[in-house]
């Protein structure tokens, strides 16, 4: 009997989800179900796994269980950059090793193509999925130097990019804060909550059963079948895919090998017409920071109004949850970063503030594989889950149905996540390191 030790808790309300129309009431699992495949987790990994399973075995019975509502978890709380290019969060300028980066780009593009098909099939608008490209914004000369080094690395990889000066940045964002930027054309940007909801709706229409507010509280092997139990029901199946990201550890896998990190976001209320004119700039854009630890900003425009989303600050938190008080405190840094960038919007306040979990490993590898006969994990996306989670879900589904496909081999060729130092040393070390990186990033935050 394997009891699930912890269930997900997300603090604060994600603006991405809150600005969308109300969801239809959740269908909870309230019976003893049988399935060919069970997917636990309805984020990027879980829902992509369900879609790939459906593509490979359209006649099989596929069930998805999630502890909360679709898009209420990290999948609906992120900044929506679906990155294809190297984005090594541990480096100073995102660049990694040349050979590894080339393979990484190829794989991430498979995931982004898969997502583009989802957007097309489900008629998701370009507010929801857009191959818009994005800019690495720099607020300092040091940031620009990171950009120049990164552009050089991209050139070696055969990838396009374009250096922008302060004037071009102002034209794009309306903000005079940035001294320059690096535009890379191939990234997709998504409205994460709308994309995840669209993907889930499409799967439901295809006959995949998605049960929400149905946390798996135990998972055990009985008479060569997996049995997942929820508070009001159970699913008995031949194969299970865990798409629960850091909660793989709560299911008893990868213990002391996953780093649980919390990020924070704030979204403004909709800007008025006068405010839109005052700030100027284009109405949709996305800026990742030239220094990986600093501030991500997005501007969105459409049915839910023109809004600006700010994301910064990060804490290492093995308990995987934070208090409302901390979300509020981190919001103060968001307000500060927002005002520095948009002084003309001094009367615009945040309507939503939230935290969200992500999962890293010490050696930046996924927690992937067949953990027990018939039980596959597609977890630990190293902070890049929109593309990486999609890819690991696709790979886990192929592993469960077809065995060692080329995509599966690409995952299996990586080492296991390394063991972490014992607590409290890991907590102290990681948080001290992140505070130091934030301090060093200075004006970029
Ligand atoms: C503020 C913020 C900004 C970010 N920005 C970006 C970005 O721009 N680009 C990017 O690529 N990534 C970004 N990320 C990271 C990204 O959100 C994650 O990597 C991604 O959500 C991971 O996808 P996943 O499907 O593996 O896991 P999740 O999205 O965490 O989904 C896992 C699901 O499993 C469910 N679950 C867990 N336990 C159980 C259980 N016992 N029973 C049933 N269900 C369970 C959860 O409810 C959850 O829905 C950001 C994250 C945050 C918080």
Image (spheres, helix red, strand yellow):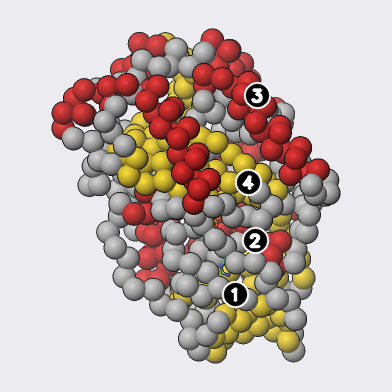
Mark 1 vs ligand 1: CB below 8 Å: yes
Looking at this rendering, what residue extends furthest in the front direction?
325
Where in the figure is residue 286, as x and y percent of width and height? 41, 32
Whichever of callouts 3 and 1 sits on the residue coming sooner in the sequence is 3
The residue sitting at 51% across, 35% down in the picture is: 312
Task: Kindly identify which residue carries mark 2.
Answer: 247
Asked if residue 356 lies left or right of residue 275, the reply is right
Camera-side mark, 2 or 4: 4
Please provide percent x and percent y for residue 349.
Answer: 31, 37
Is the residue indicated by label 2 positioned so its CB lies within 8 Å of ligand 1?
yes
Local packing at callout 4 (Cα closer than 10 Å; few below 14, some 14-19, many 20+) is many
User: In the rendered view, does 38 fall on the left or right side of 281?
Assistant: right
Q: Quadrant of ligand 1?
A: bottom right
Q: Residue at x 37, y 59 (%)?
A: 198
According to the picture, the residue beneath numbered tag 1 turns out to be 216
Q: Quadrant of the N terminus?
A: bottom right
Q: Is residue 188 visible?
A: no
Which is closer to the viewer, label 4 or label 3? Answer: 4
Q: Are marks 4 and 3 in contact (CB under 8 Å)?
A: no
Vertical placement of 390 versus 205: above or below?
Answer: above
- Mark 2 vs 3, N-terminal side: 3
**For the residues bearing labels 1 and 2, Cβ distance under 8 angstroms:** no
**Horizontal and vertical percent for residue 148?**
57, 14
User: Residue 268 or 382: which is nearer the viewer?
Assistant: 268
Q: Is residue 153 left or right of residue 353?
A: right
* Residue 92 badge: 3
């Amino acid at each position: 009997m394997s009891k699930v030790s912890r269930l997900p808790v997300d603090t604060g309300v994600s603006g991405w989800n809150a600005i969308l129309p109300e969801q239809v009431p959740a269908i909870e699992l309230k019976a003893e179900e049988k399935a060919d495949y069970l997917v636990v987790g309805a984020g990027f990994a879980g829902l992509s796994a369900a879609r790939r399973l459906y593509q490979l075995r359209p006649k099989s019975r596929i069930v998805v269980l999630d502890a909360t509502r679709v898009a209420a978890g990290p999948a609906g709380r992120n900044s929506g950059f679906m990155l294809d290019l190297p984005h090594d969060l541990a480096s100073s300028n995102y660049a990694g090793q040349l050979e590894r980066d080339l393979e990484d780009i190829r794989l991430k593009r498979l995931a982004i193509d898969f997502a583009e098909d989802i957007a097309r099939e489900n008629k998701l608008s370009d507010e929801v999925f857009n191959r818009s490209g994005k800019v690495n914004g720099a607020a300092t000369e040091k940031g620009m130097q990171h950009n120049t080094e990164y552009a050089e690395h991209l050139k070696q990889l055969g990838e396009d990019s374009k250096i922008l000066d302060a004037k071009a940045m102002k034209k794009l964002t309306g903000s005079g804060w940035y001294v320059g930027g690096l535009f890379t054309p191939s990234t997709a940007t998504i409205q994460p909550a709308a994309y995840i909801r669209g993907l889930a709706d499409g799967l439901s229409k295809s006959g995949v059963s998605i049960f929400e507010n149905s946390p798996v509280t135990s998972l055990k092997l009985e008479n060569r079948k997996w049995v997942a139990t929820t508070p009001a029901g159970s699913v008995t199946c031949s194969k299970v895919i865990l798409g629960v990201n850091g909660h793989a550890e709560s299911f008893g896998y990868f213990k002391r090998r996953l780093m649980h990190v919390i990020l924070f976001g704030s979204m403004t209320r909709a800007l008025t017409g006068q405010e839109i004119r005052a700030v100027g700039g284009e109405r949709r854009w996305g800026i990742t920071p030239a220094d990986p630890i600093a501030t991500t900003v997005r501007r969105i425009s459409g049915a839910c109004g023109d809004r600006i989303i700010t994301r910064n600050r990060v804490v290492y938190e093995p308990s995987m949850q934070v208090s409302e008080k901390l979300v509020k405190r981190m919001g103060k840094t968001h307000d500060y970063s927002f005002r520095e960038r948009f002084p003309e919007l001094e009367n615009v306040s945040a309507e939503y503030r939230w935290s969200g979990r992500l999962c890293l490993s010490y050696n930046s590898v996924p927690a992937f594989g067949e953990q027990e006969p018939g039980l596959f994990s597609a977890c630990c996306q190293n902070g890049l889950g929109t593309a990486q989670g999609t890819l690991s879900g696709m790979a886990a589904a192929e592993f469960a149905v077809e065995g060692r496909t080329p995509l599966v081999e690409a995952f299996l060729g990586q080492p296991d996540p390394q063991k972490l130092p014992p607590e409290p040393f890991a907590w102290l070390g990681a948080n001290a390191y992140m505070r130091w990186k934030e301090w060093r990033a200075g004006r970029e935050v």
